[in-house]
Image (tube, coloured by chain):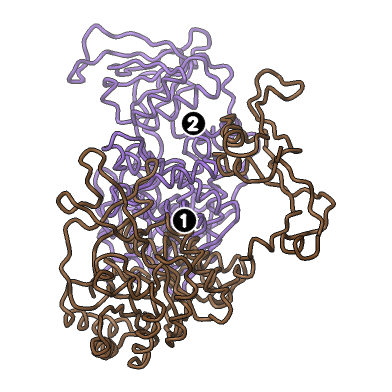
Chain colours: A brown, B purple
């Protein structure tokens, strides 16, 4: 929350308070279990900057890390649109971590501190959970997601990929824990739902997803080294950053709408700003976790996140986060239930068009050949570069709008065609009439 | 100063702007950014830590943060960030010499890439807030303390707004019948016209509880002692005085005028310059560079900048002079005016500036006297200070006519603070805002008994 400072206008503000499986935080923005939440000093600075919660960097048997550890994917001049790492869980002594968690909770009683854990045996889980609870932490997160280094030792994603193991370890944790238990899921599975359901059967109070995606971030084409390189070798790492957001949104929504699931979700994967967070919340997340954007730009990004989310909620009439959670989930449908008779076509605003013809090329080479040069228009003035859409052939695919560099220049407009709505399922089941295909010449 | 036992304080209403002001033909010389342009530019910002642009800004606006908010579509938050540090952020976005402040210090300059257009982005965010009429601040709980402010220019407006946020009662005394100070009467109209300045003043005053008494001259209509009696603290943001004129033979001739006075007439009145063929502007500072461009834009065919030094020695900004040259302004370097020639007819109007050439050490070179013919002379060689207003007050020190204060704006007199041009001798609007804001915090500390004042 941005507390109104003395003299700042106090509009009636929506409440950003978030509750994820019983873990309450002053706002839904948590640091993910990762380097930004590695120590007490960091987490406390993050809380001062405005973060509502932090999932501590995973505790377990302290490990030894390699140098180097991170790789960036830079695209068309923008650095770090994708990111990966081969860092493991905490390399600091457990006692140090526990003491700092305790101190942090003392100083910040209203903020959420969640302890991420990853150990092997039942006894180890029992021991580390007890010690975690003793710090005064608000919740636990079981790291069943890490896709490198730990999974080879039978932990991390090795657990998250096996529903039975997931369920069993979750049930141990729930048995030993007096505070809420979140299970952090790996996206390195073909279908997230059985894994979420396993956590549920194990008794988890919620799930966090997604952890990172198994990846190779790049190859040095001169030295043939795999990035990030350790001497001249590299290994697969965990992919994250804004580029993974669509994958994370899908997995979040898949669980949110899964019948019989119903657990709270802490959404993770490419959240860079308040807009991204809103998307996760609308698809069923009660809180969101952020790592990469903080690693790239620092804790101070949260000021805009809190402010932008508050303004969004005010604009849309939401008084609480709970009111927002899952609002878009009912709009996630199976393909077979989409209306095949619904029709849109592209319209180009000639006043906004700058004549780059990207839409024309995209349509010709990548779609249905229905955008043509300005010169094909009857009565062409010899100058105009505004392409012409052949509406009788336009299938409404969006490609031209996606490639257009001018916002609002190409709009996809609904056209009434006189056909009653008909989905594929209705067509198969009842023979519902479909409109004639366009662009299928 | 007039002694006055029964204060007159004959406040008269604010005067409306006339519709046919000469400045009304001026249009923005830099177009506003479109949304697409703003977002593209905002996304270029690196979001530097301890950013040089912030350090370069006298009001220390958190520039990376307001730019990031534009990039995410948090337009209102962006404006809030700007106005939290600089309540006149709309004006400053237009009139700040960003080339030598924030933009000049953008790290992209060191990378050899175009710096972020911070001024334009600030204008984008503040214009949106003005369009929507968003108010970001409200007055703090009443402290029962009252502050009197002298002058209704940027320094006092910034101080008054901050004082209201802190809950103090505020009265501004302005000798003119228009408010806004130089923002209204002096800023080059291709950057900001008087109507926009007044709109901004109203926006600042919308916090409520700022009593503006126009037509009241402190020292004449109301004594300083009475002012101090009325209020628990006093802030002087009175700006500078009249143009410095040349004491030289012929200086009484018609069509010789101080540049600041002429600019004020251009901004507030109908000003007919159609008869003039050649205007000479004397000076090399930013006022001179403004006035040469204004004279050209108003249609005077020939305009010459006449300066004692050489081109590179001008105190005016290089980027402003480059723009003036593009407008066809000529220059005469190393000339010292020593008198004015009268026209041959009635002998009442100026027909030329008598000059002597100066050497490298600015010494007159004998035998180089000559006349630069012209029919309008505008003198932009400085302004007098208003220090005399305070000269008789015990505890107030003056230096070259400027009010001496500490960094917080405290004078040596208990409860008396100062900021803006009367303190700094004449700097940018953004400096006046910064000094007014800083002084307001010092006044607040003083009123709460935490400071000696």
First in sequence: mark 1 or mark 2?
1
Labels 1 and 2 in the same subunit: yes
Which image quarter holds the C terminus of chain A? top right
**3D distance between C-alphas at marks 1 and 2:** 37 Å
Q: Which residue is mark 2?
A: B262
Q: Quadrant of residue A438?
A: top right
Q: Which chain does tag 1 point to?
A: B
Q: Is residue B370 left or right of residue A225?
A: right
Q: Secondary structure at mark 2?
A: helix
Q: Residues within 10 Å of mark 2 (few under 14, many from 20)?
A: many
Q: Which residue is mark 1?
A: B78
- Report x, y in % for residue A244: 43, 58
Q: Which label lies toward us, 1 or 2?
A: 1
- Report x, y in % for residue A411: 66, 44
Quick one: which residue is furthest to the right in this view?
Answer: A418
Q: Which chain does tag 2 point to?
A: B
Q: Quadrant of residue B234?
A: bottom left
A50 relative to B301, above or below: below
Q: Residue at x 53, y 12 (%)?
A: B346
Nearest to the observer: residue A370 or residue A8: A370
Q: Residue at x 77, y 48 (%)?
A: A415
């Amino acid at each position: 929350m941005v507390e109104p400072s003395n003299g700042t206008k106090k509009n009636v503000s929506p409440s950003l308070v978030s509750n994820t499986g019983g873990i309450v935080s002053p706002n839904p923005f948590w640091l993910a279990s990762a380097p930004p939440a590695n120590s007490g000093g960091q987490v406390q600075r993050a809380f001062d900057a405005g973060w509502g919660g932090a999932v501590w960097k995973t505790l377990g048997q302290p490990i030894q890390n390699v140098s180097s550890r991170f790789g960036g994917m830079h695209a068309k001049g923008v650095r770090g649109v994708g990111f990966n790492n081969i860092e493991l869980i905490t390399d600091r002594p457990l006692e140090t971590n526990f003491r700092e968690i305790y101190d942090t909770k003392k100083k910040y009683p209203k903020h959420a501190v969640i302890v991420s854990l990853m150990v092997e045996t039942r006894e180890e889980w029992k021991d580390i959970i007890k010690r975690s609870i003793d710090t005064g932490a608000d919740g636990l997160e079981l790291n069943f997601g890490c896709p490198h280094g730990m999974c080879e030792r039978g932990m991390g994603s090795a657990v998250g990929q096996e529903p039975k193991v997931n369920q069993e370890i979750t049930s141990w944790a729930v048995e030993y824990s007096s505070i809420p238990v979140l299970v952090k899921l790996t996206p390195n599975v073909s279908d997230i739902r059985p894994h979420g359901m396993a956590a549920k059967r194990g008794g988890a109070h919620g799930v966090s997803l997604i952890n990172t995606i198994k990846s190779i971030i790049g190859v040095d084409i001169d030295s043939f080294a795999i990035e990030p390189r350790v001497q001249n070798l590299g290994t697969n790492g965990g992919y994250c950053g804004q580029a993974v957001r669509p994958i994370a949104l899908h997995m979040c929504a898949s669980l949110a709408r899964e019948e019989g699931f119903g657990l709270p979700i802490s959404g993770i994967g490419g959240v860079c700003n308040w807009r991204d967070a809103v998307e996760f919340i609308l698809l069923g997340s009660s809180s969101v976790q952020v790592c990469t954007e903080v690693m790239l730009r620092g804790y101070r990004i949260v000021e805009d996140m809190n402010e932008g989310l508050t303004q969004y909620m005010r604009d849309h009439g939401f008084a609480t986060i709970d009111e927002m959670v899952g609002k878009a989930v009912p709009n996630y449908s199976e393909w077979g239930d989409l209306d095949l008779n619904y029709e849109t076509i592209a319209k180009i605003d000639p006043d906004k068009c700058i004549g780059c013809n990207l839409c024309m090329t995209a349509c010709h080479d990548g779609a249905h050949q229905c955008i043509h040069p300005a010169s094909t228009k009857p009565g062409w003035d010899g100058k105009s570069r505004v392409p012409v859409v052949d509406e009788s052939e336009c299938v409404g695919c969006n490609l031209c709008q996606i490639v257009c560099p001018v916002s609002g220049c190409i709009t996809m407009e609904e056209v009434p065609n006189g056909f009653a709505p008909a989905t594929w399922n209705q067509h198969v089941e009842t023979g519902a009439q479909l409109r004639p295909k366009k662009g299928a010449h | 100063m007039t002694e006055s036992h029964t204060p007159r304080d004959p406040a008269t209403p604010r005067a409306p702007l006339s519709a046919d002001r000469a400045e009304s033909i001026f249009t923005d010389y830099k177009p506003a950014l479109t949304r697409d342009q703003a977002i593209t530019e905002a996304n270029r910002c690196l979001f530097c830590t301890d950013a040089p642009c912030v350090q370069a800004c006298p009001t220390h606006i958190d520039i990376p943060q307001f730019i990031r908010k534009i990039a995410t579509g948090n337009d209102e938050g962006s404006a809030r960030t700007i106005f939290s540090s600089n309540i006149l952020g709309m004006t400053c976005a237009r009139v700040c010499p960003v080339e030598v402040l924030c933009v000049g210090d953008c790290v992209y300059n060191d990378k050899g890439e175009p710096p972020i257009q911070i001024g334009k982005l600030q204008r984008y965010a503040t214009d949106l807030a003005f369009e929507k009429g968003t108010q970001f601040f409200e007055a703090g709980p009443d402290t029962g303390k009252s502050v009197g402010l002298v002058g209704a220019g940027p320094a006092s407006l910034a101080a008054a707004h901050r004082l209201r946020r802190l809950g103090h009662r505020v009265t501004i005394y302005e000798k003119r019948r228009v408010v806004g100070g130089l923002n209204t009467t002096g800023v080059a109209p291709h950057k900001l016209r008087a109507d926009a300045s007044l709109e901004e003043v109203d926006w600042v005053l919308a916090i409520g509880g700022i009593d503006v008494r126009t037509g009241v001259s402190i020292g004449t209509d109301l004594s300083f002692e009475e002012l101090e009696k009325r209020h628990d603290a006093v802030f002087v943001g009175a700006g500078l005085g009249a143009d410095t004129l040349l004491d030289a033979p012929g200086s009484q001739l018609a069509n010789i005028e101080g540049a600041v006075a002429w600019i004020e007439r251009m901004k507030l009145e109908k000003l007919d310059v159609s008869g003039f063929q050649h205007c000479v502007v004397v000076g090399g500072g930013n006022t001179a560079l403004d006035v040469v461009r204004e004279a050209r834009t108003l249609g005077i065919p020939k305009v010459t900048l006449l300066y004692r030094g050489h081109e590179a020695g001008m105190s005016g900004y290089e980027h402003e002079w480059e723009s003036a040259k593009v407008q066809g302004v000529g220059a005469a370097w190393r000339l010292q005016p020593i008198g004015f020639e009268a026209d041959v007819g009635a002998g009442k109007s100026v027909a030329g500036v008598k000059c002597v050439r100066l050497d490298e050490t600015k010494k007159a070179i004998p035998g180089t006297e000559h006349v630069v013919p012209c029919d309008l002379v505008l003198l932009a060689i400085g302004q007098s200070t208003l220090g005399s207003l305070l000269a008789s007050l015990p505890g107030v020190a003056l230096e070259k006519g400027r009010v001496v204060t500490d960094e917080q704006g405290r004078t040596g007199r208990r409860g008396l603070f100062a900021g803006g041009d009367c303190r700094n001798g004449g700097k940018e609007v953004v400096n006046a805002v910064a000094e007014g804001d800083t002084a307001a915090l010092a006044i607040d500390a003083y009123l709460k008994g935490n400071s000696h004042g």
